[in-house]
Image: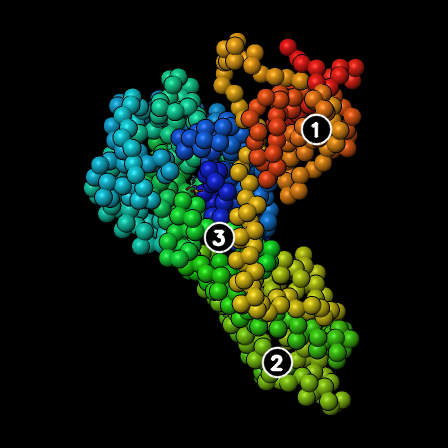
Amino acid sequence: MDKEKFYITTPIYYPSDKLHIGHAYCTVATDAMARYKRLRGCDVMFLTGTDEHGMKIEDKAREAGVTPQQYVDNIVTGPRGVLDLWKLMNISNDRFIRTTDDYHVKAIQRIFKKMHDNGDIYKGTYKGKYCKPCESFWTESQLVDGKCPDCGRDVVDAEEEAYFFRLSKYADRVQRLLEDTDFLEPRSRVNEMVNNFIKPGLEDLCVSRTSFTWGVPVDFDPGHVVYVWVDALSNYITALGYLNDQYHDYEKYWPADVHFVGKEIVRFHSIIWPAMLMSLGEPLPKKVYGHGWLNFGGEKMSKSRGNVVDPYILAEMFGVDALRFFMLRTFPFGSDGNFTNELLIQTINTDLANDLGNLVSRTTAMAEKYFGGDLPAGGELTEADRELKVLADEVTAGYERQMEAFQFSNALAEAWRLISRANKYIDENAPWVLARDEAQKPRLLSVMKNLCEAIRVSAILIAPVMPDTAAAIFQRLGVPAEGQTWDAARYDLETEGWWKTAAGEPLFPRIDMDKALAQLEQAKAEAAKAALPDLEIEPFTEDKVDFDTFCKSDFRAVKVKDCQPVKKSDKLLRFTLDDGSGADRQILSGIAKWYKPEELVGKTLVAIVNLPPRKMMGLESNGMLISAVHTEKGEEMLHLIMVDDAIPAGAKLC
Ligand code: MSP
């Protein structure tokens, strides 16, 4: 029988700045849901990615003196970028889409054309307000105190020839979708959408721009680029192969089972996105779930408010599983939550160190002490054991109900009922007392086996949220991890047979609150000090330079005296060069991906030497090495320009 499919997505992230823990919240939740569905035997497609076009990225790149593509590449694939963060957070996405991927760009052009050809996109003049950071158009009446209603920042006047999407045509159908079905959850968000956006009259949406170029070009009307939300929302289908040949899973996975999105982008997903799909004649996603924000100090965590929490620091100090657990256990998914370090540490100490960690440590330590870790089948069952089994069955059912409703916090609370009950079972049955009496050995064995079974079932339930911890627990229990699927989440002493447990270090050592808070402060200060001016990328030049300007460029042959990797940078190499002047010249170059430092010593290279000095990672770079760059099979290739060793250091190239 075919497996049931489950297609789940996160929003695709703006790589305008490095991501923070607020961004990780949705991705961790999506990951937990994807893992849960895999556990249940579903054929899961979990998509995430990056939304790389728009005026804001173009502006940011200009400020940084790089091309928009270089800018986004650095934040997506560079050190501590989006891909690194998802690896760190143990995210198990099946696919990753970048809206700058060729196949997506082509598919967007086809999508735009299709809606144009069916009469839903027409040309007009756009006059209105635009919020650059949100990439959102607003009408005057939608502004709050003259500012963007989403982020509260200033908007700018915008007027230009533009294409419009007939959103108004779909207003009734979208309203019925929202009001008459459970398309949008939590339900509270429905009223907000209907009352604030649909009832006041849904206007046609401006879907192209001419005042900037960093976007998908409208192929039948040069000068226009596609509105970034049309481009971004479509990722959910282009990533499956819709109107492109890169993938071929559209029939299999579409419609999406659920789009997880933050509450401020529910509007795009529950009004614009279904209307676009209606226009394209494609099925609608089954559900959009609008989750709350992680706040810090009472406000949404965001770079512009300067209240972001760095996931790297937290993961390093407390472990990734603890962080994942904290986010999903503490804050109900549909509501906002206030992140504090104190709450994080408290949750780790209570739920993880005291409850779960202790249960596993005590059980495995006793199994070791009384049975050398060997727990053969058998042993009598008492009423108290049966009670544990009944509770386990109840908990599993409750957990399932909660997970199916995306209530991670409640689902974990269910699992913790079993964990707490098992801890109490230890105290009630006092294995250390039983151990004193040889005649009680069979009872002692059965107590230990019941405990192991309760732990095993709990570990399956926590596996989607804390995959590494679950794996560590299975190992300590001596049960094969592969077998621990949803079907095995049934408390069943009879069939479990032989166990070989192993005691070990505590899974979650208790954290000293004061010490940890001080360490966090210090780590934050150090990170701020080491914060790189995100400039590990070479500057770009304009398309054309006049001859005089070109002649000012001073290219020289330089000989590599020494070459070293730069600490804490995956990209940079530090060159000490002989440039013929008698003094050493230092140049930093982001080429570590292509060259080992030692293989470059002694080589004669070409450098431009009259650029102003630039600081990277706290080191000064005086010039730039020249290389040839090209793309091969989608991968960027780089070759330093090396010249004949007979050319002396310092020789001028002209
Ligand atoms: N690029 C758009 C999404 C396009 S989807 C077709 C976008 N990107 S974003 O990077 O700004 O935000 C991505 C997600 O992160 C959004 O769902 C947003 O709600 C979420 N979060 C950003 N900061 C957050 C918190 N502080 N807390 C919880 N989620 C937050 O929007």
**Is residue 170 at all visible to an observer of this figure?**
no
Q: Quick one: SS at disc 2?
A: helix
Decide: is 410 above or below 185.
Answer: below
Tell which circle, 3 or 2, labels the residue nearer the N-terminal end. 3
Q: Which residue is mark 1?
A: 584
The kind of residue tagged 1 is Asp
Decide: is 394 above or below 611.
Answer: below
Looking at the picture, how far across and down is residue 58, in whole percent?
44, 29
Q: Is residue 151 left or right of residue 580?
A: left
- Taking the spot 62% from the left edge, 73% from the top edge, the residue there is 358
The kind of residue tagged 3 is Val
User: For the residues marked 1 and 2, what is the alpha-carbon distance in whole angstroms?
Assistant: 71 Å
User: For the residues marked 3 and 1, what is the alpha-carbon distance in whole angstroms?
Assistant: 41 Å
Q: Is residue 90 left or right of residue 499?
A: left
Q: Looking at the image, is mark 3 or mark 2 nearer the viewer?
A: 3
Looking at the picture, how far across and down is residue 532, in whole percent?
55, 40
Total marks in image: 3
In this view, the residue farthest toward the front is 582
* Quadrant observed for ligand 1 in the rendered image: top left
**What number is the disc on residue 215?**
none
Tell which circle, 3 or 1, labels the residue nearer the N-terminal end. 3
Q: Quadrant of residue 490?
A: bottom right
- Taking the spot 39% from the left edge, 48% from the top edge, the residue there is 305
Q: Looking at the image, is mark 1 or mark 2 nearer the viewer?
A: 1
**What number is the disc on residue 309?**
3
Q: Quadrant of residue 591?
A: top right
Q: Nearer the viewer, residue 73 or 272?
A: 73
Q: Which residue is mark 2?
A: 426
